[in-house]
Amino acid sequence: MRFSLSVPMFVLLSAALLLCSPAAFAQTAPPTPAPVEAAPASALAPAPALTLAQTLALVRASPGWRSADLQYRSAQLSLDSARARAGLNVTVGTDASLAKVPLDSGDWLGNATLTAQVSASVLPWSATFEGVRIAERALNRAGADLRDARVSLLVQAVRAYGAARDATAGAALAEAQAALAARQLEVARAQRTANLIPELALQERDAGLQSAQNALAQARTAVNLAARALANLLGQSVTLPATAAAFDAVPPLPAAPADVDTLVARALVARPEVIRATVQLADAGAQQRAAQLDLSIPDISAGVQYGQLGSGQGGAGRTVGGSLNVKSGVAAAQISFPLRDPGETAKTGLALSLNASLPVFGSGKGTALASATVGQRAAALALDSARQSVDLDVRQKAADLLTALDRAEEAASALARAQASLTTTRARLEAGLVTPLDVAQAELSAAQAQNALNAATANAYVSSLLLAQASTELDPTLLNGGF
């Protein structure tokens, strides 16, 4: 029988995340650093065992989480820089000179000039304005990447914690299997001494014990590897509970996906791959428009200057001026203030200037426009490909969840059969029809079936998280309250 819940899939994680509240931490302190291994059962004062709530909280301080934060912060600073360049810019400078003319009989004459310039983008096609729009799109993409990175870390933490629990349970079963194999070998030796079984049967029991001991060593190695994997994810040492029962309980079996098309529609809007491809398409369109403007707008600049303009060989005096570059869309105002009086050589006047440059041949601007058009088409195809990939990914994750639910249902049936067999074996023992070893074997089989059901249930739970991640339903702000 399949269990189902009516809540949305993203709520599956919220129950665990609620354990991260201050009240929960008041009762469960974070684990102290310890070697990356399972807590020994014989330790006199073992360190506090890691819980799922602590795992989800420690993810916030993990290297992966901090790296994602820094990448988003970098995009924010890039936007601030682009806005600053598009705003009012003030530059102050100085120019100093020392001359002696003629060299053999002249005097050394020095002069210094202070200059200041104020510039700003004023035309809508200015490159600085487009730079702001590009930075805004980059920040939007960085926000989607940040959210996806945090969700991925949360899912990885849940999977790693569940893997450690499964490994610990597997080690306990392997230890029980080795103990049972040792008992079976002792009985076989006694039977061989009484000449009740052939030598081959004794050798088979001995080989079974060796196999069980090898499986136990592998299971213990798996526990240590699971602990190390969890420690690497969190960026610090962890101490696992000594037994599987000491871990947090296996989460409930999730519900089957109700409407896959709705999940796909949501993912096609919010998935980082789609947002990234959409931003690339917008950037490609901006490049095409810039290439078109570069081809159609001539390079024209106009300027005006007023003040003590220089004439002949005399230098200029105090002047103010302004300029406008039509192609770049930047207007500027300048002021020049020489510290030395130019004297009679500088007369007050007004100067107007106009510079124009029209490409005739070999500019390559037409080729640049064609290249930008091809880039835009390629970006449009990339967006279509990203949408198709997201559609397939969500549907595949939904199918994986259904498969995991079916396997959990099969594991529940297997557990029911194993428990029924154990009940029958115990009854047969009371009737004297089987030995205690047969009961021990039936108990081990029931424990294995229970572990298999726990693993299948946890796998179905993780599959639901992966589907929620793929459909962007899993919200990382359940843990940290926002960016």
Image: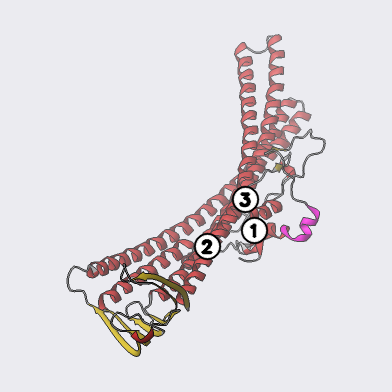
Q: CA distance from mark 2 to mark 1?
A: 30 Å
Q: CA distance from mark 3 to mark 2?
A: 26 Å
Residue 237 position (above or below residue 265): above
Q: Amino acid at mark 2?
A: Ser
Mark 2 crowd level (few <14, some 14–19, many ≥20, 10 Å Cα): some
Segment colored magenta:
20-28
- Based on the displayed image, in which of its 4 quarters is residue 390 positioned? bottom left
Query: Is residue 114 shown in magenta?
Result: no
Q: Which mark is residue 157?
A: 3
- Contact (CB < 8 A) between labels 3 and 1? no
Most common secondary structure along the magenta stretch: helix
Q: Which residue is mark 2?
A: 74
Left/right placement of residue 103 relative to residue 439 reads left
- Contact (CB < 8 A) between labels 2 and 1? no
Q: Which mark is residue 27?
A: none
Q: Amino acid at mark 3?
A: Ala
Query: Is residue 21 shown in magenta?
Result: yes
Q: Which residue is mark 1?
A: 13
Residue 61 position (above or below residue 93): above
- Contact (CB < 8 A) between labels 3 and 2? no
